[in-house]
Amino acid sequence: MVLGIYPYLVMNGNGQEAVKFYERALNAKVIGVQTFGEMPGNPEFPTPIEAIDRVMNAHLKVGDTDLMLSDTFPGQPYQIGSQVTIAITIGSVEKSKEVFEKLKEGGQIEMPLQETFWSPSYGQVTDKFGVTWQISTHIDDNE
């Protein structure tokens, strides 16, 4: 089951500034901001110093709408016009796989579906129309 869909803005190193800007401009409530420096460490891939303060994920509430935001990781491509993606939250790994497979038809996988520390199944795909989707599975622990 699809749980929700929301805009996801991608910044190029100025995510902290963008959070403050949208908080003020849209009267948004900042629910949370997590930086790349706050990720669980991996000795094989240490976080570069220039990434530590970049936004890995920010969650703002604008009225009843969720607005998500992150920075690119240093060295990742950034292209004007591609800074808005669509995030979709799905309630099961199986449904995430199904949606991902359908969206990738004629498109391109940006990040294969995989387990992350925030999701049992997360991936990114650009569909055949050039729209980039972030697929994230959220399983309610209360179910």
Image: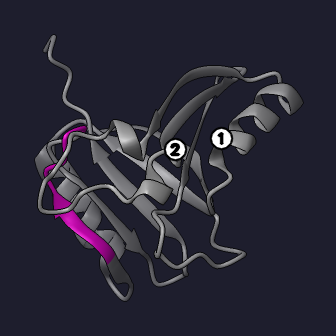
Label 2 crowd (10 A; few <14 / some 14-19 / many >=20): some
Label 1 crowd (10 A; few <14 / some 14-19 / many >=20): some
- Mark 2: secondary structure: loop
- Residue 14 spot, x, y in % from top left: 68, 53
Q: Which residue is mark 2?
A: 53
Do labels 1 and 2 touch, CB within 8 Å? yes
Residue that extends furthest to the front in the rendered view of this protein: 49
Left or right of 120, for residue 36: right
Q: Residue at x 11, y 50 (%)?
A: 94
Residue 112 magenta: yes
Residue 47 magenta: no
Q: As displayed, is residue 126 above or below residue 120?
A: below
Q: Which residue is mark 1?
A: 16
The magenta stretch is: 110-118
Q: Residue at x 35, y 65 (%)?
A: 124
* Residue 47 image-quadrant placement: bottom left
Left or right of 61, for residue 51: left
Which amino acid type is marked by label 1? Answer: Gln
Q: Earlier in the sequence, mark 1 or mark 2?
A: 1
- Residue 117 spot, x, y in % from top left: 19, 40
Quadrant, the C terminus: top left
**Residue 76 or 125: which is nearer the viewer?**
76
Residue that extends furthest to the bottom in the rendered view of this protein: 106
- Residue 97 spot, x, y in % from top left: 17, 59
Which amino acid type is marked by label 2? Answer: Asp
